[in-house]
Image: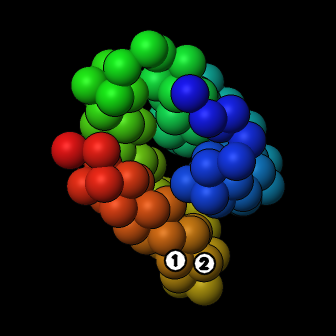
Amino acid sequence: MQDYHDLLVWKRAKDFVVLVYQITKNFPADELYGLTSQLRRAAVSVLANIVEGRGKSTNRDFLRYLFISKGSLNECQCYFELALDLEYISEEQFGIIEKKRGEVGYLLYKLIKSLG
């Protein structure tokens, strides 16, 4: 199988994770084990499931991990909507993260479609 480093979706998902960490470092300290932790875990899960799935021997297995990755990406959307409502992030930050999340989601969709 192809090295995961060559996958565009992996590159964009990695950018997404870095952005999530940058944005959440400004969350209130009392959210460190709450929303901050949940968001970071979900974002890392997007990336990690792409990598783990790529290491499997069949496309069917890879697809299963891509769907898990997609679910984690949706989880991130929910958490960022909550962060916006709680005023932990600005509308501008929300727009930036949503654009990146949408890009990763589109690339996941295209990869899933190509393998399915």
Are the two marked residues, 2 and 1, in contact with CB atoms closer than 8 angstroms?
A: yes
Position of residue 1 in the picture relative to residue 72 (left or right): right
- Residue 96 - label: 2
- Disc 2 from disc 1: Cα separation: 5 Å
Q: Classify the position of the N terminus by image quarter.
A: top right
In the image, residue 48 lies at what x, y percent? 58, 28
Under mark 2, the amino acid is: Ile
**Number of residues whose C-alpha sits closer than 10 Å to that of mark 1, classed few (under 14), some (14–19) or many (20 or more):** few
Q: Is residue 6 above or below residue 72?
A: below
Residue 66 picture location, percent across and down: 37, 37
Question: Which structural element holds mark 2?
Answer: helix
Q: Callout 2: 10 Å neighbours few (<14), some, many (20+)? A: few
Q: Residue at x 39, y 67 (%)?
A: 106
The residue at the far front in this view is: 1
- The residue depicted at 76 percent of the width and 51 percent of the height is 18
Tell me the residue that label 1 is attached to: 99
Toward the bottom, the furthest residue is 92
Spot occupied by residue 109 in the image (x, y as percentages of width and height): 31, 58
Looking at the image, can residue 7 be seen? yes
Q: Residue at x 55, y 18 (%)?
A: 55
Which residue is at a point 38% across and 53% down the rendered structure image?
111
Look at label 1 and name its amino acid. Lys
